[in-house]
Image (cartoon, rainbow, N blue to C red):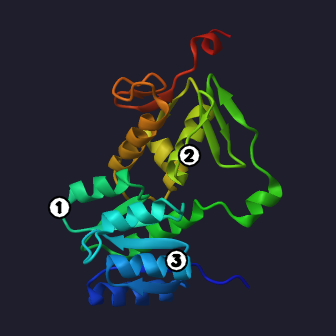
Amino acid sequence: MADPPLILVVDDEQSYRDALSVALQREGFSVDTAADGIEAIERFEASRPALVLLDVMLPKVSGIDVCREIRSRSRVPIIMVTARNAEIDAVVGLEVGADDYVSKPFRLRELIARVRAALRRIPSMEDDEVGYVDVLEVGDVRIDPGRHEAYVRGDAVALPLKEFELLELLVANAGRVLTREVLLDRIWGPNYFGDTKTLDVHIKRLRAKVETDPGNPSRIVTVRGVGYRYEKPAAAAAS
């Protein structure tokens, strides 16, 4: 029997650490905890968790900096925990690589659902056995899902998991409009409880890496009131 997924809970408030530990263990997860930013990085290196629940407001090293450090070395899912009405913290967290965020006080059932949804997005060993879809190539963008590699104009582009999945989905459907609902469902899962800001932030980060002029995007275009479309190059669109 496989070991249960290990969740690293990072929060300086012991009451939250204890409550989350009990709730996660009741749902069948293993739990490790950290009370500050330095300990969070140490525990991450030592335990290699399947997912990190990371509070923004931490002593010694902020949650934003912890997120940035973890993301520089791993694609592990990170769910940021922010104080109520601290939307700017959530947006910054997404910009440095978090996959999702929840605001305190949160409902444990909702949080558990988000944890499960995030874990379902992790490629499993079975994926390697059944193989991946073919390499995608539209214009000067090339995506190799099996190797988790993306190239723009021949240059490799480093993409966290969610950004890679977004680009792959958009390129695979080049020329078609994908609604925000479809993108959220396919990338974050049907049980995603957050709002569309998460998608918007990831699109913004993705544009910064693949667009020649991110402020005036020509690849990933917004279809107002609907969603996003990956534009085919003129030659490809005409064929």
Q: Nearer the viewer, mark 3 or mark 1?
A: 3
Q: Is residue 181 left or right of residue 197?
A: right
The residue type indicated by label 2 comes to Phe
Q: Are marks 2 and 1 in contact (CB under 8 Å)?
A: no
Disc with the residue nearer the chain's start (2 vs 1): 1
Quarter of the figure with the C terminus: top right
Pick whichever, 73 or 107, lies toward us. Answer: 73
Residue 55, picture quadrant: bottom left
What amino acid does circle 1 point to?
Answer: Asn
Decide which of tag 2 and tag 3 comes sooner along the chain. 3
Disc 1 element? loop
Q: Secondary structure at mark 2?
A: helix
Answer above or below: position of 152 versus 55: above
| Residue plotted at (63% across, 34% down) | 172
Nearer the observer: mark 2 or 1; the answer is: 2
Q: Position of residue 227 (x, y in %)?
A: 42, 33
- State whether residue 23 appears in this view: no
Q: Quadrant of residue 100?
A: bottom left
Question: Can you tell which of label 2 and label 3 is closer to the viewer?
Answer: 3
Name the residue beneath numbered marker 2.
164
Q: Residue 73: x percent and y percent?
A: 52, 62
Which residue is labeled 1 in the image? Answer: 85
Residue at x 58% of width, y 78% of height: 5
Mark 1 crowd level (few <14, some 14–19, many ≥20, 10 Å Cα)? few
